[in-house]
Amino acid sequence: MLKAMVIDDSRAMRMILARTLAELGYEVFQAANGKEAIETLEGAAEGVSLILVDWNMPEMNGLSFVRKLRADQRFHGVKLMMVTTETQVEQMMTALEAGANEYVMKPFTREIIEDKLRLLGVLQ
């Protein structure tokens, strides 16, 4: 089974994204911030191939998480999608330059998430 992780400090947002990914065939892990996500990835979530991450979170924000993950060769092939309320073009460019593969602005629809996953090549 494919594995994915949803990182967001909003429990409701984690649940929405996790349900969508589960319905698309993923085993989904969740974390409330980047620090928790790193700890989970180094433990139970080995083999995660897709991560959806929010930008604004306590302890370690999404941009710092993306940079840390991209600096670690073990996670080189993981697809990263930033899912955030940050709508400035400059922020989008910063996230993509840091290593995010896609960028989705909240609010979003299930169709937008599915379209982005197709662009990433992780959904038929």
Image (cartoon, rainbow, N blue to C red):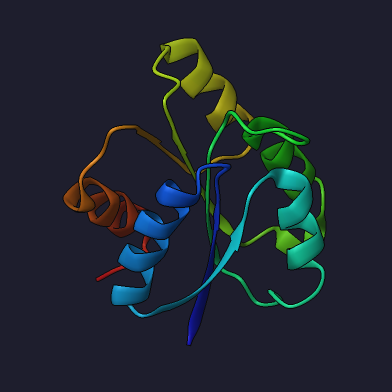
Query: Is residue 83 at least partly visible in the picture?
Result: yes
Q: Of residues 4 and 14, which is closer to you in this image?
A: 14
Q: Is residue 43 depicted above or below 96 in this figure? A: below
Give how far across and how far down residue 124 sits, in percent.
24, 71
- Looking at the rendered structure, the number of numbered marks drawn on it comes to 0
Q: Is residue 89 left or right of residue 62?
A: left
Give how far across and how far down residue 15 sits, in percent.
41, 59
Q: Residue at x 75, y 65 (%)?
A: 40
Q: Of residues 62 and 36, which is closer to you in this image?
A: 36
Q: Residue at x 62, y 39 (%)?
A: 99
Q: Is residue 15 depicted above or below 93 in this figure? A: below
Q: Residue at x 65, y 77 (%)?
A: 47
Residue 9, by quadrant, is top right
Query: Is residue 122 at least partly visible in the picture?
Result: no
Q: Is residue 84 left or right of residue 64?
A: left
Determine the residue located farthest toward the front in the rendered image: 11
Q: Is residue 28 left or right of residue 88?
A: right
Q: Residue at x 39, y 17 (%)?
A: 87
Give how far across and how far down residue 8 sits, in percent.
55, 45
Q: Is residue 16 depicted above or below 21 in this figure? A: above
Q: Is residue 99 left or right of residue 24?
A: right
Give how far across and how far down residue 3 sits, in percent.
53, 75
